[in-house]
């Protein structure tokens, strides 16, 4: 079965600092997704990465995908308190070029940003 | 669109009772997914449907769990009989056939006492 590993699982960082969350996966999929979940809330889509080398940015968050390394990163620049949440990466389980399949989620990275 | 709608938002029941969770996907979405989220196991896919047909139910924990999708705008997840270890947040999500993003509902927080 496809494995998705995120690290770190817990991240506590000071406002203004930079950090990167890593997402490794075990298949040749080239479709990867990042979601955000606030405590007690649902999951909200952040980024969709659909090809090798894809890079997406939104505010202080930037996501990238390296399909050859089977690695995606979520980089946080100059963190602010509002970014505190749990971040999930998810990989489409369908083979490259085939129709979209189910998603396999990582365990999530719980980010806390403190003053 | 109102998004994916789940009901109830919270359910508290006693062990042995039947529990039914409901989901209305986004109109036009032909894939529907049921997930369970717990601290111990994270986010698990239970079952998903395409055009109302179950495609993969390998994540359904045991025979006590069943899911149906009688039409394109409604799905249920039933637990009978419920057990304390079923306590979790259950999410429903939907997407289009050609769409990449799964849209999640607000979830149902289930507590089985």
Image: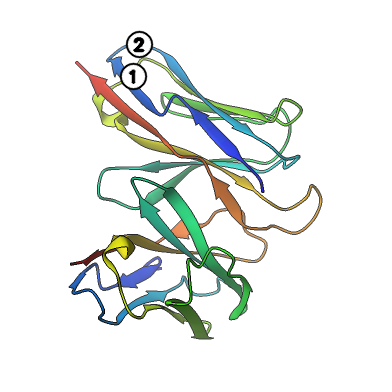
Q: Confirm or deny contact between disc 2 and disc 1 (CB under 8 A).
A: yes
Q: Give the distance between the C-alpha atoms of the residues marked 2 and 1, in whole angstroms.
A: 6 Å
Q: Chain of mark 1?
A: A
Q: Nearer the viewer, residue B109 or B66?
A: B66
Q: Earlier in the sequence, mark 2 or mark 1?
A: 2
Query: Which residue is more in the foreground, B74 or B26?
Result: B74
Say how many tags the image has: 2
Q: Residue at x 79, y 47 (%)?
A: A96
At 67% from the left and 61% from the top, the residue drawn is B98
Above or below residue B43? Residue A24 is above
Q: Give left or right: position of B49 versus B98.
A: left
Relative image position of residue B9 (x, y in whole percent): 24, 67
The answer to whether residue B8 is left or right of residue A20 is left
| Circle 2 residues within 10 Å: few <14, some 14–19, many ≥20 | few
Residue farthest toward the bottom in the current orientation of the protein: B70
Disc 2 element: loop
* Residue labelled with disc 2: A17
Whole-percent x, y for residue A109 in the image = 41, 32
Reading the image, the residue beneath label 1 is: A79
The 10 Å Cα crowd at callout 1, few under 14, some 14 to 19, many 20 or more, is many
Q: Is residue B107 visible?
A: no
Q: Quadrant of the N terminus of chain B?
A: bottom left
């Amino acid at each position: 079965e496809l494995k998705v590993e995120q690290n770190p699982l817990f991240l506590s960082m000071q406002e203004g600092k930079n950090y990167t969350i890593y997402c490794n996966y075990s298949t040749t999929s080239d479709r990867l997704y990042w979601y955000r979940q606030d405590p007690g809330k649902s999951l909200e889509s952040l980024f969709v990465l659909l090809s090798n080398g894809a890079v997406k940015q939104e505010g202080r968050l930037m996501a990238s995908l390296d399909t050859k390394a089977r690695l995606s990163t979520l980089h946080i620049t100059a963190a602010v308190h509002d970014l505190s949440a749990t971040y999930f990466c998810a990989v489409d389980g369908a083979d490259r070029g085939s129709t979209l399949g189910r998603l396999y989620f990582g365990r999530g990275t719980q980010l806390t940003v403190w003053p | 669109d109102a998004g994916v709608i789940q009901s109830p938002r919270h359910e508290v029941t006693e062990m042995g009772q039947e529990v039914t969770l409901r989901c209305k996907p986004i109109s036009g979405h032909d894939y529907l997914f049921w997930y369970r989220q717990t601290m111990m196991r994270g986010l698990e896919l239970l079952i998903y449907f395409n055009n109302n047909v179950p495609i993969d139910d390998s994540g359904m924990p045991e025979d006590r769990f069943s899911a149906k999708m009688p039409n394109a705008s409604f799905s249920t997840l039933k637990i009978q009989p419920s057990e304390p270890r079923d306590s979790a947040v259950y999410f429903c999500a939907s997407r289009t056939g050609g769409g990449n993003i799964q849209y999640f509902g607000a979830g149902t927080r289930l507590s089985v006492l």
